């Protein structure tokens, strides 16, 4: 970025991740940040580990108001992809780049605008909780993993002066499948409505390992490099976390909201079938978590 050039950024979605990422970007005077949202909020208030960011953000609530920007950052739930796509179409110009901050491994198949040569798939690990509309508690600085290409490096440059660790990595696909391994095991918490501490029970831990083993087999078939110890590592991670912590799919189900079961479990079953494999436990988790 040149010293006099303002980079225009539109963030689609102001949940915990969108609000946190957007709040940090507003601290850079060379970035013009606008949130594209369904519901209006007067202030953006994010309590971060190092400071409180309190600002009056730019807001758009109607797609008809949108104009092309330099960057679109999508931070909606995966099941809101169709709604996000409407915003993306309106915000995209000849040079617009798109960063996709969502769960799963299908980032590059969700959106057709702009083309894949201007898309940046992102793996987000930023513990944050939305407390109310426009109010978020960020518990740890966290990280974002993106591909080590020109688009990825340009995205990382947006966060150069923030504490969020944005890392371009060579093997993004394998990292995405490792994150999916963690997320797919979280179905157990959502189904039992029990926090992370339930992983201390060995029968529960073995069920988590079995879900991850399916994920590993399918991920390898898709070209990811995944170690044999990953199921044990995932369980160890759950056991090392705050026993009262609640993952997002658990929170969504507990609140009666739609869940991202398709992006976390259903995708494993779908891609298993594409590769001549089966993933019955992930398929069952997906069915149960999407049952009405």
Image (cartoon, rainbow, N blue to C red):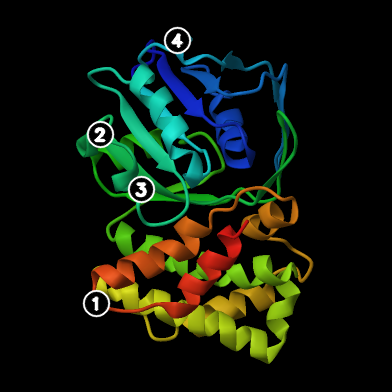
**Residue 256: horizontal and vertical position, in percent?**
71, 50
Check disc 1 and report the residue beneath it.
Answer: 276
Question: Which element carries disc 3, helix, strand or loop?
Answer: helix
Give coordinates of residue 34: x percent, y percent. Answer: 52, 18
Classed neighbour count for the residue bearing mark 2: other residues with Cα under 10 Å, few (<14), some (14–19), many (≥20): some
Which sits in the foreground, 61 or 43? 61
Identify the residue at horizontal 39%, vertical 34% (top origin).
Answer: 157
* Residue 186 image-quadrant placement: bottom right
Label 1 vs 2, first from the N-terminus: 2
Residue that extends furthest to the front in the rendered view of this protein: 292
* 236 or 30, nearer to the observer: 236
- Secondary structure at badge 4 equals helix
> In the rendered view, would you say 240 is above or below 24?
below
User: Relative to residue 15, is residue 144 drawn left or right?
Assistant: left
Q: CA distance from mark 2 to mark 4?
A: 23 Å
Q: Where residue 107 is drawn, which disc sits there?
A: 3
Quadrant into which the N terminus falls: top left
Q: Earlier in the sequence, mark 2 or mark 4?
A: 4
Marks 3 and 4: which is nearer the front?
Answer: 4
Q: Picture quarter containing residue 43? A: top right
N-terminal-most mark, 3 or 4: 4
Q: Residue 242 appears at what percent x and percent y?
A: 75, 68
Residue 225 seen in this snapshot: no
Instruction: Tell me if residue 266 can be seen.
Output: yes
- On residue 118, the disc is 2
- Mark 4 = which residue? 64
Indicate whether 115 appears above or below 95: below
Distance of mark 2 from mark 3, alpha carbons? 13 Å
């Amino acid at each position: 970025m040149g010293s006099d050039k303002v980079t225009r950024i539109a963030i689609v979605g102001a949940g915990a991740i969108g609000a946190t990422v957007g709040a940090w970007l507003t601290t850079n005077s060379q970035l013009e940040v606008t949130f594209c949202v369904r519901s209006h909020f007067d202030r953006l208030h994010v309590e971060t580990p190092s400071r409180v960011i309190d600002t009056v953000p730019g807001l758009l609530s109607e797609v008809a108001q949108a104009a092309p920007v330099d960057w679109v950052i999508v931070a909606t739930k995966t099941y809101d992809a169709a709604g996000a796509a409407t915003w993306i179409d309106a915000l995209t110009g000849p040079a617009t780049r798109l960063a996709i901050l969502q769960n799963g491994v299908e980032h590059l198949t969700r959106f057709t605008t702009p083309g894949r040569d201007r898309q940046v798939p992102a793996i987000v690990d930023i513990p944050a909780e939305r407390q109310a509309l426009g109010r978020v508690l960020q518990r740890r600085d966290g990280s974002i993993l993106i591909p080590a290409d020109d688009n990825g490096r340009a995205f990382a440059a947006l966060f150069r002066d923030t504490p969020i660790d944005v890392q371009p990595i060579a093997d993004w696909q394998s990292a995405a499948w490792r994150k999916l391994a963690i997320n797919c095991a979280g179905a157990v918490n959502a189904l039992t409505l029990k926090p992370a501490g339930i992983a201390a029970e060995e029968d529960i831990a073995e069920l988590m390992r079995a879900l991850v083993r399916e994920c590993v087999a399918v991920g390898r078939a898709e070209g990811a490099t995944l170690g044999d110890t990953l199921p044990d590592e995932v369980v160890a991670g759950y056991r090392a976390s705050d026993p009262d912590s609640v993952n997002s799919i658990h929170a969504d189900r507990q609140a009666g909201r739609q869940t991202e079961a398709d992006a976390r479990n259903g995708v494993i079953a779908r891609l298993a079938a594409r590769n001549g494999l089966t993933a019955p436990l992930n398929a069952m988790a997906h069915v149960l978590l999407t049952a009405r």
